Amino acid sequence: MLTDVNLFEGGNIFKDEKGQPLTTRISRENVVPTVQWLEKLTGLNLVDNMLGSTGYKETSGDLDLGIDADKISKETLINQLIKRGIEPKDIKKSGDSVHLKTPILGSTSNGYVQTDFMFGNPTWQKFSLKGSPEGSPYKGLHRQILLASIAKAQGLKWSYKHGLVDRETNEVITQDPKEIAARLIDGTPKDLDSVESILKKIKGRQDYDQLTADAREAFGRDKLTLPESAPLPGTGAWFRQFVDMRHI
């Protein structure tokens, strides 16, 4: 089973008594102004630390913002929000995050969007928590699943929090994007930007099926598919038919 990819997506932390979401999606043009309002509220640099697909897609289900855990704690941020007039019921904690029911553009008349203040190293988070490109059928979570699948096939673990990890000892091997890309797919950090770029890089590898085995199973549960492995060099259609028959 894949681990360390349980990222919360969708912006559904805040619900009413009937279980209906109290927050909505936010349009791209409203993202930066709303984050700027949050900057005034918190005194933190947030626009430069937007994570995932925040601000890139036409609409976002939530605002993912990186917070330097070495500079401020979750408790300190929560206390600051309450002092600035935020109702405690509009603040929640989960794992490494603080969630805020945020008025869009700073006005309750515009409705609310969920903000996830994600504590860690923002520089690392920008790499590890990249979102999917506009129009992609895959989410940022699927990139995490694919990276975990590729790492597992090579006796390693992928952790969006810690980087590349030794599967036996659980010791962190590296958090350097260049080294991670080289170890996992013999590529560059740019090759790890999305599901599509990762697949493009590994499509011709002889171990493609092994690298994507766990991901293929997990993607299937979301009714998503991965490309079939490419024929090995020097093999023809008859060989592909033989290989495919093993799965019938």
Image (tube, helix red, strand yellow):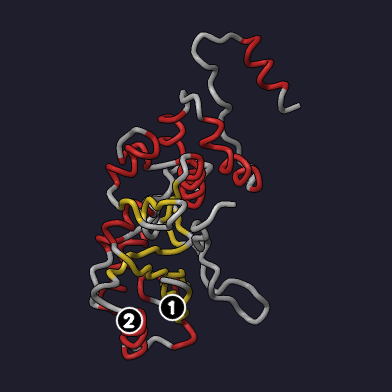
Q: Amino acid at mark 1?
A: Thr
Single out the residue that lies furthest toward the right. Answer: 248
Label 1 crowd (10 A; few <14 / some 14-19 / many >=20): few
Horizontally, is 74 left or right of 229 in the view?
Answer: left
Q: Nearer the viewer, residue 43 or 214?
A: 214
Q: Nearer the viewer, residue 57 or 187?
A: 187
Q: Nearer the viewer, residue 146 or 239?
A: 239
Asked if 50 appears above or below 71 in the picture, the reply is above
**Percent of width and height locating residue 171:** 38, 57
Q: Residue at x 35, y 69 (%)?
A: 119
Q: Nearer the viewer, residue 214 or 62?
A: 214
Asked if 6 appears above or below 195 in the picture, the reply is below
**Percent of width and height locating residue 93:** 46, 78
Asked if 150 appears above or below 234 in the picture, the reply is below
Q: Which mark is residue 77?
A: 2
Q: Secondary structure at mark 1?
A: helix
Q: Residue at x 42, y 69 (%)?
A: 116
Q: Nearer the viewer, mark 1 or mark 2?
A: 2
Between disc 1 and disc 2, whose residue precedes?
2
**Percent of width and height locating residue 133:** 42, 43
> Could you tell me how far apart the alpha carbons at marks 1 and 2 are, in whole angstroms?
21 Å
Label 2 crowd (10 A; few <14 / some 14-19 / many >=20): some
Q: Residue at x 42, y 36 (%)?
A: 198
Q: Amino acid at mark 2?
A: Leu
Q: Number of marks in the image?
A: 2
Find disc 1 in the rendering and name its residue.
108
